[in-house]
Amino acid sequence: MITRLSKLFVRTLREDPVDAEVASHKLLVRAGYIRRQAPGVFAWLPLGLRVKARIETIIREEMAAADAQEVHFPALLPREPYEVTNRWTEYGDGLFRLQDRKGADYLLAPTHEEVFTLLVKDLYGSYKDLPLTIFQIQDKYRDEARPRAGLLRGREFTMKDAYSFDVKDEGLAASYQAQRDAYERIFARLGMEYVIVQADAGAMGGSRSEEFLHPTPIGEDTFVRSAGGYAANVEAYTTPAPEARSLEGLAPATVVDSPGTPTIATLVELLNERHAKAEPWTAADTLKNVVLALTHLDGTRELVVVGIPGDRDADMKRAEVVFAPAEVDAASEADFARHPGLVKGYIGPWSVRGAVLGEESSTGIRYLVDPRVVDGTAWVTGANVDEQHVLDLVAGRDFVADGVADIASVREGDPAPDGSGPVELARGMEIGHVFQLGRKYAEALGLKVLDENGKLVTVTMGSYGIGVTRILAAIAEANHDAKGLIWPEEVAPYDVQVVATGRDAAIFEVAQGVAEQLEAKRLEVLYDDRPKVSPGVKFGDAELLGVPRIVIVGRDAAEGRVELWDRRSGERSSVTIDEALASF
Amino acid sequence: MITRLSKLFVRTLREDPVDAEVASHKLLVRAGYIRRQAPGVFAWLPLGLRVKARIETIIREEMAAADAQEVHFPALLPREPYEVTNRWTEYGDGLFRLQDRKGADYLLAPTHEEVFTLLVKDLYGSYKDLPLTIFQIQDKYRDEARPRAGLLRGREFTMKDAYSFDVKDEGLAASYQAQRDAYERIFARLGMEYVIVQADAGAMGGSRSEEFLHPTPIGEDTFVRSAGGYAANVEAYTTPAPEARSLEGLAPATVVDSPGTPTIATLVELLNERHAKAEPWTAADTLKNVVLALTHLDGTRELVVVGIPGDRDADMKRAEVVFAPAEVDAASEADFARHPGLVKGYIGPWSVRGAVLGEESSTGIRYLVDPRVVDGTAWVTGANVDEQHVLDLVAGRDFVADGVADIASVREGDPAPDGSGPVELARGMEIGHVFQLGRKYAEALGLKVLDENGKLVTVTMGSYGIGVTRILAAIAEANHDAKGLIWPEEVAPYDVQVVATGRDAAIFEVAQGVAEQLEAKRLEVLYDDRPKVSPGVKFGDAELLGVPRIVIVGRDAAEGRVELWDRRSGERSSVTIDEALASF
């Protein structure tokens, strides 16, 4: 097909849209690929739709290669299945809810585990029917609090979501691997850099879970990786616990006055002034006690205190994972007021052995610690008395925690939990997610099949998602320069753009002929045939649109010569028309 | 591609689903093409999705041939544009409305005139940019009061909707014709019988409007057509008015007692008893006065009385068109109670000339008449007094109507308004609609472009819809028998189904080979490779699924022979494998 630019429904803009924060958003709007309809909701113009269709084709081909079969669910779904799994409630404000004319509750599905499970339950009943992997490419809805970055976090977005169904755990592992392999092939074909990181299962609840992150400074996810091959979302990073140390010969705990030291910085200053030792005190010597308020699913509010090394902060995202499905907040002033035993700025452990800390320190609140707080480690921490701290408080001797909570922030240089060396931190964007759901959904919705022995067994499931529209934006983000988009060949809206320059009808005749000969090679051709537009504007538009290869037909056309222009390298070379055609 | 039936995600059912009323719904569910998710909301299984994709491909090809460019809008749209055109309100309960987390109003779009208009306004500004026709294939939502008949009237359904934009009326006429022609090509390729009927513009408001109706006894629309080529929706049929007759020499009006004759039947009986004449009285001699209650957009309620020949009923759908945008109901008892001048069963015209009917007959209510009630026609009708009628009441002499209202039912044999002979009535299903919107939407939303003289002019638009999922159901409805579906080749989920019968491994080897050779001919092949399923079950499933051509590989495979089975004719013939392959 030849598309004439003079007829194409597109308008390029010189100015960035005012609401655009990131390059992909700016350029996709400026180049006429998408237009905003509402916050996080976009319309697709012909150019955008072409790129999207090519990405979808690649995904479909690789799904077919992985024996996944395509189905299609509505976006509008009844409440009931989501009520059974509690996600109607759990999704909170993120779910678009509505009622029909009869008052029945519906939602716009953010993901489809429930109805895929019910569909398989409806159709299948025997182990012989499995394994099965089915997928759809479908528009999903999430009412994001802050839709941002154009397509990267929209409220309506296209996803490929697949679900696998197996009788046995080994079957699930194989289905999971098949999708994981397909994802690797898809991202390779799309030319997208990616890192597979261990991910937290989060609200989905399950066993193995990995994210495909596309490294980019504008990514919303932080991940860690070691030179030795470890990679994980920071939420999934687990702090390796050091060996416990001997309690013998450790200095006894001492309570000291510490006026005006409610923060770690002021405490360390006081320590170095009043209790100087060979090595200066640092924040790492102190134990910071963070008070968190958990809101459980049944609505009850519980305070917990977590002791973490004073040189780290609590990472609330990591805390959310640790305490899921409870919601986590910092404790409020009201929380402190209800618990006078918590002396703000001077909190220390309780569950005390011996009499180091006073009786008033027993609060009935769970006291948890960072994995690094192993037996035999000594800390400076609050004495649960205003303006007093305790030195040499030894874990396992002077206090015993109620448990471990790995909520401290992760830092460059922290050890990978698999021993593969120190980690570095990077930012990435989630472009895919593979997930062993296990039997959670099948259990909740009663998906059982007869096994070889005629016994009903619950099916085990996997869930696999790729964000189609997000991938498109990520590719745009990774493939542009100051002048515009630079599409990889595999997803470009057109294979080649022919630009006719000048006003001479003969030039347009040659250009038309070149376009036709390229079309005859089964290439998708965009032909800039606009008669009264200057070469400068045409070149600027070509750079903005980002078709990877451009043929310029200008003055030299009379001598049978054209220019080949590589959008990515910027190189132009004068060649004969035959050479130009032969290069495709 | 070869799809193995043993792996295909499908389950055939022997029983009809309990909620299914029509054959297409029953068979599409039983054959495993679709599954219900909620009233009027369906999920698509692999077989259904394949047929749908093929229909969409045909539509896309014909849209491209008509120079229409594809775009894609979200289903979730903000309220504002629909507020401007008043459709946010006009759609009433038929619109799915919702709010986001910030309380902003949204809708699930039932159709996209507003946002297409705004998009063109955003991108274009000159007459040089036009004409333009853009389309999408997209899932739409309407909260039908009574979703029924499976896909034929769903609450979520896929539509191709196109919109044309022109500066001049002749341009709109050309764009309209191009879409109309494309629709004819699409339905021809789909092998669908259709009739193009004049349609009422209805709530859309515009000038030329035609519907593509697929004749079928289960259609929701009634249409009329004449042998001479006239065709119209009954709502759009206009009754030709006869010539007015001379008032001279007509008998004077006479009021007569008519006890116990509140209905036309009882009245006619009384006339024949007490006022017999050469020809017996019939209902056609009487004027029936129908009291309607109109609810105007501003909420006010108005009663009108329409006089129609007594041998016809008021057709409420036709009345809706006549009185749009007001809503029309039959008058209630309360309405009559508020208007004692309306003597139920004995109502006659007022606006009386002369003193035939009493003073009390002046009610302040509009009195309208059927187009057949021309000057000089004489009627028996109510005298506006209980148990009295008037004979020989002559239009134009004894009463003058306030206007004409063409609301009477249309009958077989009524004259086509274009003089092309008597009409017949038939039932049809709307499968396409082409519509000259004119400047209504452009006006409301400010879509103007500069014309040749640099003057801003309002754009004129057309709107063109095809129901993709409805077409699929209509094809199923028109192509089935008692045993199952019979797909036309152009939309069949597979080109050919290979059925291996018997338990002999050699048969399966031959069948596999046949499937591969068919695949090599670029055919889509469904291979029934199920090892332990009886031939009877396999044949039954093949008939239910409806792949048009079937190759049976059975006992004769050893001699290199197979059976060719034509699903539609039911004919089977034994041929050599080479002959079988050569027939494709």
Image (cartoon, coloured by chain):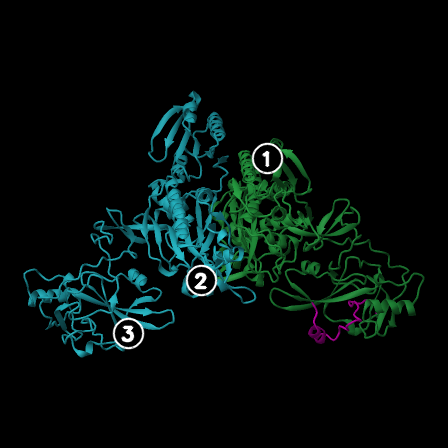
Chain colours: A cyan, B green
Residue B558 marker: 1
* Subunit ID for the residue under disc 1: B
Q: Quadrant of residue B276?
A: bottom right
Residue furthest to the right in view is: B278
Nearer to us of marks 3 and 2 is 2
Tell me, yes or no, whether the two marked residues, 3 and 1, touch with CB atoms within 8 Å: no
Label 1 and label 2: CA atoms lie apart by 49 Å
To which chain does the residue with label 3 belong? A
| Residue appearing at x 37%, y 46% in the figure | A474
Give the SS element for disc 1. Answer: helix
Left or right position of B45 against B262: left
Count of number-bearing discs? 3
Q: Residues within 10 Å of mark 1 (few under 14, many from 20)?
A: few
Q: Which residues are magenta?
A: B330-354
- Report whether mark 3 lies on the same chain as mark 1: no
Query: Given contact means CB atoms under 8 Å apart, are the residues at marks 1 and 2 in contact?
Result: no
Q: How far is mark 3 from mark 2, CA to CA?
A: 38 Å
Q: Single out the residue that lies furthest toward the top.
A: A559
Is residue B262 in view from this perspective? yes
Report x, y in % for residue B253: 87, 67
Residue A220, given in percent of the width and then of the height, sits at 32, 53
In the visual, does A239 lie left or right of A30?
left
Mark 3 residue element: helix
Instruction: Please give the label number shown on residue A443.
Output: 2
The lab-note entry on whether marks 3 and 2 share a chain reads yes
**Dot 2 amino acid type:** Glu
Q: Which residue is mark 3?
A: A335
